[in-house]
């Protein structure tokens, strides 16, 4: 007796074989059905593996060193989502449009690896880079931007808030050898001669320091400049965050410096 099987077009190749063989086995003698169902199970698994392999071959990875074998999510014929690409190098993690994008681990053929954040195929964000060396591995932790290491912190300093009369706050790292922060407070009119009284206009001063994070051992004040006052904090423990009050509450600013070293900070007021 012949058996004809009609399978809807929506079924994939493995599904067609599975449905067809199941219906054929249904009409076989009972004593042979057990062996035939075992054959069907093994055949179905093999067919699914073939389907997965075909899918992996059709999913492109746009990084030449990763071209070879890919297993994972696809979109429009490119690796997109979570997956693993193996070629000369190996990458496992998030993809977008065929390149690493998101969080993932890239291992080079020499054993070096980067585990962290990616954007459009480049290291970008927080991560760990391990270099395989003969004596001892070297580990670099921190942040990358457009494939370049920018430091232990994404932003070496941060101005959290300031009042309206504090018009400028700029920070510059001078060197890595000294843990110091030197702040120069400059005003538009402080130290000049008043046109009304012909007396010197008082320079603004930092009158209070409130430590939020970190610490310092010693502070020196230098009032020898004609239009500004310098404040030198020595033996600073970083990250160093503090609220600076100007002229007993007239103005203020809050600044944090994360990276150790010698820093120069220029603060300007509008009066």
Image (cartoon, helix red, strand yellow):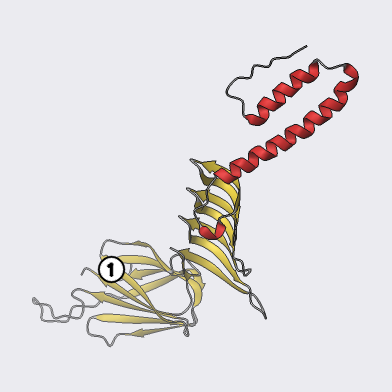
Residue that lies at the very extreme toward the top in this rendered image: 1
Q: Nearer the viewer, residue 77 or 139?
A: 77
Residue furthest front in the image? 1
Query: Which sits in the foreground, 266 or 261?
Result: 261
Q: Position of residue 136 (x, y in %)?
A: 66, 78
The 10 Å Cα crowd at callout 1, few under 14, some 14 to 19, many 20 or more, is few
Mark 1 lies on residue: 168
Above or below 167: residue 50: above
Residue drawn where x is 22% and y is 78% of the image: 202
Q: Position of residue 268 (x, y in %)?
A: 26, 72
Classify 129 as above or below 233: above
Q: Which quadrant of the figure has residue 244?
A: bottom left
- The picture quadrant where one finds residue 34 is top right
**The C terminus: image quadrant:** bottom left
In this rendering, the answer to whether 168 lies above or below 101 is below
Determine the residue positioned at 35% across, 66% down.
Answer: 253
Does residue 150 appear to the left or right of 111 in the view shown? left
Q: Depth check: give the residue in front, 148 or 177.
A: 148
Name the residue rendered at 75%, 22% in the picture. 22
SS category of the residue bearing label 1: strand
* Residue 133 vs residue 199, the one in the foreground: 133
């Amino acid at each position: 007796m012949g058996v004809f099987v009609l399978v809807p077009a929506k079924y994939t190749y493995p599904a067609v074989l599975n449905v067809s063989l199941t219906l054929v086995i249904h009409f076989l003698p009972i004593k042979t059905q057990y062996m035939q169902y075992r054959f069907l199970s093994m055949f179905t698994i093999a067919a699914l593996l073939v389907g997965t392999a075909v899918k992996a071959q059709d999913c492109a990875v746009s990084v030449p060193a990763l071209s070879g074998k890919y297993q994972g999510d696809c979109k429009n014929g490119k690796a997109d989502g979570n997956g693993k690409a193996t070629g000369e190098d190996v990458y496992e993690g998030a993809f977008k449009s065929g390149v690493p994008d998101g969080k993932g681990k890239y291992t080079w053929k020499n054993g070096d690896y980067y585990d962290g954040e990616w954007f459009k195929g480049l290291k970008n964000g927080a991560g760990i880079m391990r270099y395989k060396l003969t004596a001892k591995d070297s580990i670099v932790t921190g942040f990358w931007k457009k494939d370049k290491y920018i430091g232990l912190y994404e932003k070496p300093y941060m101005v959290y808030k300031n009042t309206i009369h504090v018009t400028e706050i700029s920070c510059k790292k001078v060197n890595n050898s000294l843990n110091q922060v030197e702040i120069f407070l400059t005003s538009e009119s402080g130290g000049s001669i008043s046109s009304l009284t012909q007396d010197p206009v008082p320079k603004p001063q930092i009158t209070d320091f409130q430590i939020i994070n970190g610490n310092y051992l010693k502070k020196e004040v230098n009032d020898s400049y004609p239009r500004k006052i310098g404040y030198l904090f020595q033996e600073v423990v970083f990250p160093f965050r503090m609220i600076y009050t100007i002229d007993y509450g007239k103005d203020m600013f809050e600044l944090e410096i994360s990276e150790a070293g010698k820093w120069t900070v220029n603060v300007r007021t509008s009066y």
